[in-house]
Image (tube, rainbow, N blue to C red):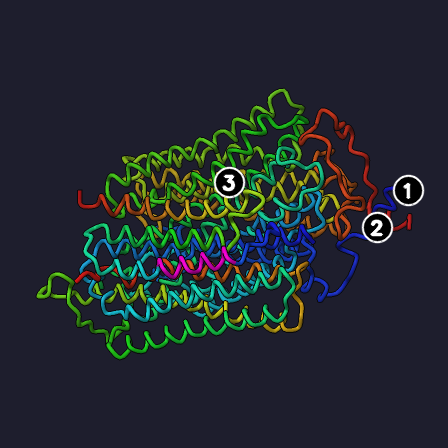
Amino acid sequence: MEQQRDASSLGMWLFLATEIMFFGGMFCAYLIYRLWYFPEFAAASNSLDITLGTVNTAVLICSSLTVVLAVHAAQIGKRQAQVIYLALTLVLGLAFLGIKAVEWTSKFREHHIPGTSFHFEGEIPGHPGQPVDQQHAQIFFSLYFAMTGMHALHMIIGVGIFSYLLYYAWRGRYTPEYHTPLENSGLYWHFVDIVWIYLFPLLYLIDRKK
Amino acid sequence: MATTAVTAERDNYLNQEYGIKTWLLTIDHKRIALLYLLSITFFFFIGGFFALLIRLELLTPAGDLVQADTYNKLFTMHGQVMVFFFLIPSIPAVLGNFLVPLMIGAKDLAFPRINLLSWYLYIIAGVLMLHCMLTGGVDTGWTFYTPFSTAFSNTKVIEAGLAIFISGFSSILTGLNFVVTIHRMRAPGMTWNRLPLFIWAHYATSIIQLLGTPVIAVTLVLVVLERALHLGIFDPTRGGDPLLFQHLFWFYSHPAVYIMILPAMGVVTEIVPCFSRKRIFGYQFVAMSSIGIAVLGFLVWAHHMFVAGISLYAALIFSALSYLVAVPSAIKVFNWTATMYKGSITFSTPMLYAFGFIGLFTMGGLTGLFLAALGIDVHVTDTYFVIAHFHYIMVGGAVMGYLGGMHFWWPKISGRMYPESLGRLAALIVFLGFNLTFFPQFILGYLGMPRRYWQYPPEFQVLNVLSTAGSTILAVGYLLPMVYFLWSMRYGKIAPANPWAASGLEWKTSSPPPTFNFDHPAVVDWEAYDYENIPAPEIPAPPISAEEARIAR
Amino acid sequence: MSEHVVALKTNVAVWLALLVLTGVTTGVAFIDLGPLNTIVALVIATCKALMVVLIFMHVKYASDKLVKVVVISAIFFLMLLLGLSLADYSTRLL
């Protein structure tokens, strides 16, 4: 059993390593275009709602805590606590997705979704009169939606996994001797949190100085 | 002998249960290996079929067999199928899956159900790719360069991209399984330094699969999004950079070629000591060189982009790094040679393939150094020189390694011996056919014949005809083993547990092995390749024929 | 994976630190530090990530080094991708 747990944990870590490289490819694209098109990236970044972004970051951080508490509850054999913390994690995860949906809707209304109706009306921070290159701005938003979209997809998968865990925790499956699925799913959830920890400053805080 | 008759009758993984459901729902790594064997052989035929059409078209300078657009599809699909659906899975998914647990003394891989999932993902990807090919195909070249693939091509780029994306998951899961298995499931006494070098090679391969494949996965996602939503990330007319695609694509696709060659090197490292009756020379060097290739392989990708528009300084850096990556490969060649020195060589079929590998891989590798030199690359890039270079490595190297391995372990996998003289004949045919096909292409490329062109100036015809002639001989060489392997399953001599008197745990269990690999759990207290303690098979003990086995029952 | 049970108050402390750092990141973004803004933001993000990895994900308490090797390797190769790509992009117009 010990070997099994060791093996599955290592397996999850290796999977997370692949995820680092997966998101990394998009971070690479982001890095290059931020260097090339900094003014438009800054302008576009300022059109994102910094309050919602910060709140979402806090939401994910809280959800990481509830995950840790759920695993802790399993380690000390508290079924009730497990269920509560897993449910809280789910609630927070759904809250994150909800806020994301709100943000995306406002992007849609502002015509910031890349495509035929894309039109960006912003100003370059520090250079109010400077014309904004629509193509450069569109690249920011392409990357914004690709990266937050991929992140959201991973959150949705996480929500699915944790719903499954919630059900089985309620059924009493996870004990101090066996709670590997909780631990490994926790690793996944924390990873998704870490991706957002980097996405937030890179997307929302490019150039907010007045 | 009574014991061999009993051996032929034992419960093994093949006869333990029958029925298609027991195969399609198996979690036995050996059965999954055979499922992969069937599937990759199928795709090898498909890719080979496209190759044949290419070579037929190139018999004449004029474009007279197919239209230019069709020709673009032919070379694209030849490349995609061969790379993603044959070469990348071949040795790891067939021989690796079969042998990794056996070689380390484990009952199965760490995650048997994920292993089966791996195969199903491969099949789903394969079906999608087949559908794509049957409904129009792709014409972008296997490299999918933008903006052609994202904005201009009228072919099924999205479908092909998705198929490759899914096949990538299959690859990642196989790698993940191997790494965990090798770390956590070695038999007692099987220390890292007692591992067969085949295992080291697959460990290194798995690292590449894990770290590289996700990058092409996300790149394909971006390509699909760009094509579907007209984004512009890679499109210069929309502010994007086509070179960004190339950087991301080659970041995986260069290490991918090491995914294709490292396992073959692992196979050769098992074959050479056995048929030289000598332990491998420089075990540590060979082990470390596998890891070295895996790591250094990630540092050289832009050598595919020297003339694409990267900066000269970047080109200089990548050129220097590309020279560096040749070193670990050369170390292996030296070690194989040193192993054979003063060894007692048997020219068995696997050994013939190993010889072929060493020679042809060396040629392919050296021509890689030519390509790494910026001055030369400017002239021969995008010519047949490059095509010859990578076919020497992929076909002269990887495929020969695969065939050598299939012959070496066939007795273990099937419990039967293949006919040795036919095996040697086929190996020779492959070697001759291969060289006739691809050596002229070095010359063609040097003389300036571009790749991916469906017609060419008449002065290149003679060499092209030679190449096509070679390809037909090569095809015969490939068909022969398929025929006699199948034949051997019914009529081949029953194989003993260790027909080659080889070292390695896999030979200490019966041929074919029982479902859980070992009747008695192995405890290892000997070093790898201890050929000084293994008596050579003098005259191979006449294995009983299938007839005798039936009579004895 | 060790069966080391992390103390509750450690987890809560990390959580609070993460929230504080989030606030700091957002706040500092409004202060003009020139090119340092980006660096500060990334440094803070890295500190947060490290805390999650080491404590929430137990890497600090892992009994063998393998997990640390896995994480460091992945980051190393990502840095290779970013760094060597930059080698091209940053020297293009020289």
Q: How many numbered dots are placed on residues in this image?
A: 3
For the residues labelled 1 and 3, the Cα–Cα distance comes to: 43 Å
Which label belongs to residue B10? 2
Where residue A85 appears, as percent x and y from the top left, is 54, 69
Q: Is residue B24 above or below residue B86?
A: below
Give the mark toward the camera: 1 or 2. Answer: 2
Magenta residues, dominant SS class: helix
For the residues labelled 1 and 2, the Cα–Cα distance comes to: 13 Å
Which sits earlier in the primary sequence, circle 1 or circle 2? 1
**For the residues tagged 1 and 3, is the chain the same?**
yes
**Magenta residues (range):** C9-21
One can see residue A44 in this view? yes
Q: Chain of mark 1?
A: B
Where residue C49 appears, as percent x and y from the top left, is 41, 54
Where residue C24 appears, as percent x and y from the top left, is 31, 58
Which sits earlier in the primary sequence, circle 2 or circle 3? 2
Q: Which residue is denoted by mark 1 in the rendering?
A: B2
Q: Is residue B344 above or below residue A28?
A: above
Q: Residue at x 24, y 43 (%)?
A: B311
Q: Image quadrant of residue B509?
A: top right
Nearer to the camera, C59 or B329: C59
